[in-house]
Amino acid sequence: MRPYRCSRRVGFTIVEVMIASAIITVVMAAMIVGMQREAKNLGDMVTNTHRERSAQVVMHRIEMELEFAAGANTDAWTSGATPAGSGSLMVDNSLGFPPMGTLLVNPGGLGVERIDYSGLDRSTHTFTGLDRGVQCTNPSGHANGVRVHWAGGATALENQIAPAASQWDGQAASPTGPVFFRGDGTGFSFRVPTDPTGGNDYFDAGGIRWGSEVNGNPNANGWSCLRFVARRQLTEAEANRDINQDGDQDDTFDVGQIELMRWDSANNGGNPTQVNLCPPIVLQEVCNYGGDLDADGFADPIFLWDPFRGSLSIQMFITSGMHNQRANVQRIATTLYLRNGAL
């Protein structure tokens, strides 16, 4: 009698192993993709939170810098004719103008021009290192006695009833109502009470001793300004959103930082102190600095100085990063009332 043998297959066939491996591979791939997506979302959240915090920090820093400040009106007039191809431009005074920046020449006129400058000879009030016709303007010849405005400053007009169209560059909303202003609103020039000896005596026979801390030292000839400095560009197509809500995604924006600059107005050609107060998160539309960014019908300058009320309205549209492949854009704003008013 033959013994009984149990014939039972042990293990898997090659086909079964291949099928199982394929299933495991698909599951693992799905898990990895999910983990990568979650990691990216977490990274985006961390970046967004950091940038939002940076925006709050810069607002606080600005408030501290301006606690006792007095604002300056940066206006001048050309001294002599300036041809369209000239590499320099002379004005009657340069008080409050930063050592580098952008000029708004002949605002409201047919030959309005924005000019970048990289140098300023204060002994002759001459702007040098000119880049003519920037921000979608054209190089133009300018006669003697033409108004020159530091383009960074947005200054409210004294006449808010019915100013002529040639007198203002924009109309912004404010806590007290619409405000007509001159300039682009990407900066603010100011001074603070200063004791040149390093003490706490901020007064003399003439009143407050104004100045600024330059290179770590209190300086009676010192000036300060806050200004927007572009670092890169962002298109609405890249952002995957209509940032300025004008019905298309065709616009381009400069993304930049708010910089604190201090300089000695008596040290002709001296290097200023420059400190970036935030990472590149602040938005300005290319060729439309200070323009309407929230489609409310009003311009949106970063800084709007009203010397008659002593108020400085500050608002920033910031990009805090991407979320779900779409740029986050937020508005932060405040209004400061400078106790020392205007210079």
Image (tube, grey):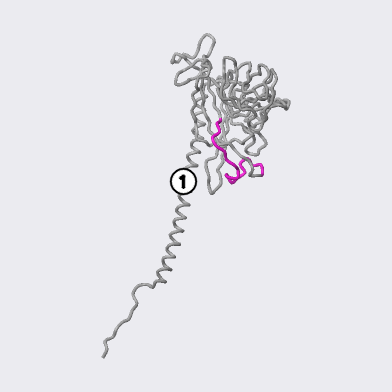
Figure quadrant of residue 15: bottom left
Please say whether residue 178 is one of the residues in the magenta stretch: no
Residue drawn at point x = 69 percent, y = 22 percent: 142
Vertical arrangement, residue 74 with respect to residue 59, above or below: above
Figure quadrant of residue 318: top right
Kindly state the secondary structure of the residue where label 1 is placed: helix
* Residue 53 place in picture, x, y as percent: 48, 37
Please say whether residue 237 is one of the residues in the magenta stretch: yes
Residue drawn at point x = 43 percent, y = 59 percent: 28
Q: Is residue 119 visible?
A: yes
Residue identified by numbered label 1: 43
Amino acid type for the residue under numbered disc 1? Gly
* Residue 196 place in picture, x, y as percent: 47, 14
Number of marks in picture: 1
Q: What is the magenta range?
A: 228-247
Vertical arrangement, residue 128 with respect to residue 33, above or below: above
Vertical arrangement, residue 265 with respect to residue 4, above or below: above
* Residue 284 place in picture, x, y as percent: 59, 35
Residue drawn at point x = 44 percent, y = 56 percent: 32
